[in-house]
Image (cartoon, rainbow, N blue to C red):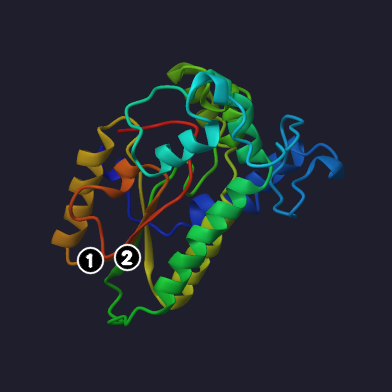
Amino acid sequence: MASAKLLVTALAALLAAAGGAGARELSRLEMTSAEMIADGGGMPLIHMLRPLRGSGGRLGRRAGVPCDSWRFAVETNSVRGWSTIPARCESYVGNYMMGGHYRRDSRAVVDEAVAYAEGLQLAGDGREVWVFDVDETTLSNLPYYAKHGFGAEPYNSTLFGAYVQEASAPALPETKRLYDRLLALGIKPVILTGRREDKREFKSGERQKLEDAGYVIVGNIGDQWSDLLGAPEGARTFKLPDPMYYIG
């Protein structure tokens, strides 16, 4: 069971999907060139969504906190324990995820991660590792969530499980860029997921096993704070954006 959860392997098996089955999935989902993201990011639009004018925060303003401020509070771990995004924010989150903003935010995080990795003084003994989460970090489940309200619908384990069994989730391009650079630098990627576990306690325990085995965790990247919190976190952590769901 533990070996199935802690995948101390090259990330190539998962990320190869970007050029194989994942590429075919992207092609299948692709609509027309006019529906692609304006910045050339390559993520296919599944719903025809028009980017919101201005900040996009007007949605839901009458009902309290505007949606852009709500997303900020989520990313800073100030809003916790929520099960679905506010219903008023479905269009806002959809536009964020599909309209290019999400890709730009991810790029900003990965730029920092790459710069940090390039500045490390490595021992060169093969013991330096970088921990990657899977969902919304290594692989994108956006094709699923675009059909289920971008997090506005309650989580359905049966439906999501069926989607997972398709093995069609595309690799996230920015994470792939980080992965490729780490391999070139001689840092080993470690994939660690805990879909059915208490993520904070489970993941911190698995990271401790890595350190006990003599590995040095130089970096740790995930989309949930539960991916990153709990000693040992690693020398430095990087939080990718994800306003669609919360896992404590």
The residue under the point 26% across, 60% down is 234
Instruction: Tell me if label 2 and label 1 are in contact, CB under 8 Å.
Output: yes
- Amino acid carrying label 1: it is Tyr
| Residue 147, above or below 112 | above
The residue under the point 39% across, 48% down is 133
The residue under the point 30% across, 41% down is 226
How many other residues sit within 10 Å of disc 2, few (<14), some (14-19) or many (≥20)?
many
Q: Nearer the viewer, residue 156 or 40?
A: 40
Which corner quadrant of the image does residue 29 belong to?
Answer: top right
User: Does any portion of residue 16 appear in the rendered image?
Assistant: no
| Residue 92, above or below 83 | below
Q: Where's residue 102, x and y in %?
A: 59, 46
- Amino acid carrying label 2: it is Val
Q: Where's residue 18, x and y in %?
A: 62, 51
Quadrant of the rendering where the C terminus is positioned: top left
- Taking 224 as reference, is 197 left or right? left
Q: Which mark is residue 129?
A: 2
User: Which residue is under mark 1?
Assistant: 215
Indicate which disc, 2 or 1, sits on the residue closer to the N terminus: 2
- Taking 59 as reference, is 33 left or right? right
| Residue 243, above or below 106 | above
For the residues marked 2 and 1, what is the alpha-carbon distance in whole angstroms? 7 Å
Q: Where's residue 168, x and y in %?
A: 60, 37
